[in-house]
Image (cartoon, rainbow, N blue to C red):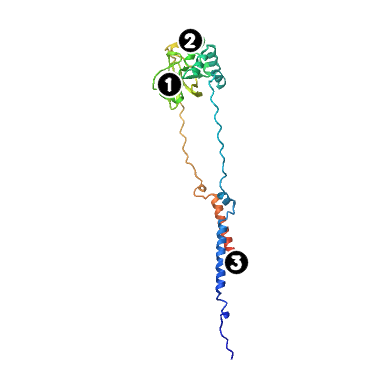
Amino acid sequence: MLLFSSSPSSLSPSQPSPRTKQRNKMKLCIILLFGIWLMLMPSSPACAQTAAKPPSISLTPAPEPAPPADHVNLADLLTVAGPFHKFLGYLESTKVIDTFQKQANDSEEGITIFVPKDGAFSSLNKPSLSNLTNDQLKSLLLFHALPHYYTLADFNGLSQKGPITTFAGQHYTLNFTDASGTVHISSGWTNTKVSSSVLSTDPIAVYQVNHVLLPEAIFGTDFPPTPAPVPSPDVAPSAETEDSVSPSSIESPSSSFRIAGVVLWSQLVLAISAGLLLF
């Protein structure tokens, strides 16, 4: 009868050796590292776009501003600025343009000029300027200027001071009212407003007005009646409609988040498949 002694080499195959266990552990570590690498790898354009840094922009220094001109030529300004040909023609024929130009160039106070557009002279029927003497016409033109530079914001303070003396003298005054940023001018005969700013750079301010300024010192105090305002038609208020909000715009993730989620899931499936193949 033969007896067989048991030895370590006759172990059951169901019990792996220590070397095999160590190899399996190494395989698991490799699989985990590979899966983490796949998930962190920016394999999609969406991920690459979010990971990319914005390009650096080199800022070039701004060019230095050109030095301001010494003087503003009022005749050239009124020629190109708008339809002010009739007012400029009166200024040049009476030499009042020279008085305004000297005030702008040689005084520290500056000047503010109110310029009527050509349509204001066309609509002027009564009183007519054709019956004025040369001195009265000069006073009327000087009546359109203040011997000081004023911005539009300065007229708010002028409205609190009462009548303001114009370039024509102490008997030629204007009243100013600032209504929510709109400057209104009253001379008794004329009620108008500043419709636009032609130039407002110290020491010269030129503002466009809708009507010719007529002084009381020339035309008296027999003012024409003010026409009654035209009543505005009754307009039914429009019903307010609530802003409609599409359900898709509420709590809907952006496309970039959806793409990133799909990429992560695909990478995780690849990692698991690679691990199964190694086993």
Q: Is residue 19 in view from this perspective?
A: yes
Quarter holding the N terminus? bottom right
As measured in the structure, the alpha-carbon distance from the residue carrying label 1 to the one carrying label 2 is 23 Å
**Element under disc 2:** helix
**Element under disc 3:** helix
Q: Residue at x 41, y 24 (%)?
A: 157
Q: Amino acid at mark 2?
A: Gln
Whether the residues at callouts 1 and 2 have beta carbons within 8 Å, the answer is no
Q: Label 2: which residue?
A: 136
* Viewer-nearest of discs 1 and 3: 3
Q: Position of residue 209 (x, y in %)?
A: 49, 20
Q: Is residue 16 left or right of residue 148?
A: right
Mark 2 vs mark 3: which is more N-terminal?
A: 2
Q: Amino acid at mark 3?
A: Leu
As measured in the structure, the alpha-carbon distance from the residue carrying label 2 to the one carrying label 3 is 109 Å
Q: Is residue 132 in view from this perspective?
A: no
Q: Label 3: which residue?
A: 278
